[in-house]
Amino acid sequence: MTPQQIFARMREQWLAGEPTYDGVGLADDVVVETPFAAPGRPTRTVGRERVLEQARAGRASFPVRFEDCRDVVIHETGDPDVIIVEYELVGRHDVTGVRASAPFIGVLRTRDGLLAGWREYQHTMAIAAALAPPPDGLTGRTGNGF
């Protein structure tokens, strides 16, 4: 698969409410990095099985259902196996009903048609704000971050 096809697959997984990775197209030594992950969350995960385990656990514990992945811009690089992706995820909190969005940047690297690396830069303040309990028990509001 091309880097663009792998990103399209990731996007499909997000919008289907599935873990980002399902084992299809992952290199055995894949590296997933989130340098700005929330405290207590891993910033680097190495290896197919470990990445799959983290993806399943992360999806199960994250109380947001993604509704859209918009404003996608894919930047080609000098390396045909690497793209840089800008996008915004929109989601709704399962418990509070808060609908919010946050921007991301990802660097995706392939090798022999498999995902070899994904480095995602998240707007962690927007995410934290969206996951916080609503003031005075309000639900259904729209927020700036999910």
Image (cartoon, rainbow, N blue to C red):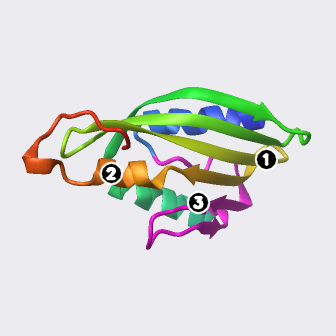
The picture places residue 74, in percent across and down from the top left corner, at 71, 31
Q: Is residue 59 left or right of residue 139?
A: right
The picture places residue 11, in percent across and down from the top left corner, at 55, 35
> Reading the chain from its start, which is encountered first: label 1 or label 2?
1
Queried whether the magenta region covers residue 71, the answer comes back as no
Gap in Å between the C-alphas at discs 1 and 2? Answer: 33 Å
Residue 130 — which label? none
Residue 129 — which label? 2
Gap in Å between the C-alphas at discs 2 and 3? Answer: 18 Å
Residue for badge 1: 110
Relative to 47, does residue 2 appear above or below in the rendering? above
Question: Which residue sits at x=24%, y=39%?
Answer: 98
Image: magenta residue range: 19-48
Task: Bin the neighbour count of mark 3 within 10 Å (Cα to Cα): few under 14, some 14-19, many 20 and up.
Answer: some
In the picture as drawn, the residue positioned furthest to the right comes out as 78
> Reading the chain from its start, which is encountered first: label 3 or label 1?
3
The quarter of the displayed image where residue 31 is located: bottom right
Task: Bin the neighbour count of mark 1 within 10 Å (Cα to Cα): few under 14, some 14-19, many 20 and up.
Answer: many
Instruction: Decide whether the magenta segment is chiefly helix, strand or loop.
Output: loop
Q: Amino acid at mark 2?
A: Ala
> In the picture, which quadrant includes the C terminus?
top left
Question: Which residue sits at x=53%, y=69%?
Answer: 42
Residue nearest the viewer, comparing 50 with 91: 91
The picture places residue 27, in percent across and down from the top left corner, at 73, 55
Relative to 34, does residue 135 appear above or below in the rendering? above
Residue for badge 3: 34
Q: Are marks 1 and 2 in contact (CB under 8 Å)?
A: no
